[in-house]
Image (cartoon, rainbow, N blue to C red):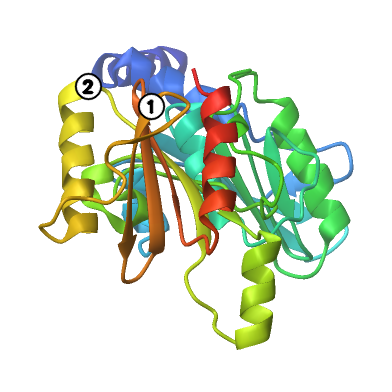
Amino acid sequence: MTRPNRMILMWLCVCLCVPGAVVSEALDMKALVPRETPDGWVTSGSPQVFTKESLFEHINGQADLFLQYGFEKSIFAVYRKDSGRETIDVDVYDMGDSVHAFGVFSRFRQDNHPAGIGLDSYLDDDYAIFYKGKYFVVLQADESNPSGLRRLAKTVESRIVDASPPPKEIMYFPKVGLKPGSIEYYPQGLMGRQFLGKGFKATYVPSENKASKENTGDEGPDSNLFIAVFDNTDELESALESFKEVLSNGKSARGANRALHGLKMVTGEDAYQGKIVIVHKGRYLAGTAGFKSKEVAEGLLADLMKKMD
């Protein structure tokens, strides 16, 4: 058998042994990390593709977090400047959808330093992250190089064709008093309570809380607005009853018969999260925790409820 015929036979064997979808997914991921960029970055070696089964080999200490957020697969590439030894590591993670991509981004964002990349981004001297559609992207430089990180991030972003919008829930949070870059998504255990399941949390810095902390020196709990998202009515009602029980400590929860914009409102106090207000609307339980002023808390919650579907 001639050499070309042997090569053809070997290729056919590979194609028969490896499912077409797996080959296609690997090729799709590799298309996100170009061999060379316009400004001189070149991949060092072959990019590596990781799956749910092999992710621990790459990021052992963080793999569990990624899997909680719906991780599907990822690709890792090392870029090197052709004129020197400087390198930038690039990880592109397929998180399944934009909600989970935002979620893992929100947990890794260290502050509010947006770089104008993707749907949201963070950039410092040697580290950059962004998300776009279902993809979460991490770039790490071996030395300070914010301009190089930005350009390489832009190159990767341009190759992502997923145009999925950001989670609609992040637009529900009122802007007044909102701490920039504080909105987070949790796939489970929202507000540290397993019965709330998945949802969004934002931190607020209202003037009344700030003044109180400055005058007393008491840090106290953070002031949060949260939105728990439920897929069925039974889970939502069970979570609401659990919250009533927590807030009442076996007694009738205060304010259970009050209403906010025609919706039943439950109020109470938690030893760690301070005063809590909860309202049910549609598939959501929305609430506030830690606000010193009932009026401020209920005002923000009312604004949030107006925007909700």
- Evaluate whether residue 48 shows in this view: no
What element does badge 2 sit on? loop
Which amino acid type is marked by label 2? Asn
Q: Quadrant of residue 250?
A: bottom left
Q: Is 26 rendered above or below residue 81?
A: above
Which amino acid type is marked by label 1? Leu
Q: Quadrant of the N terminus?
A: top left
Who is closer to the viewer here, 216 or 139? 216
x%, y% of residue 217?
A: 60, 87
Is residue 83 found left or right of 241 in the rendered image? right
x%, y% of residue 52?
A: 31, 41
Marker disc for residue 263? 1
What element does badge 1 sit on? strand
Is residue 181 found left or right of 49 in the rendered image? right
Foreground label between 2 and 1: 1
x%, y% of residue 228?
A: 37, 37
Q: Residue at x 36, y 22 (%)?
A: 22
Label 1, residues with CA under 10 Å away: few <14, some 14-19, many ≥20: some
**Which residue has dot 2 on it?**
232
Who is closer to the viewer here, 148 or 188? 188
**Marks 2/1: CA distance?**
19 Å
Q: Residue at x 23, y 31 (%)?
A: 236
Q: Residue at x 21, y 48 (%)?
A: 244
Q: Quadrant of residue 10?
A: top left
**Residue extending farthest left:** 250
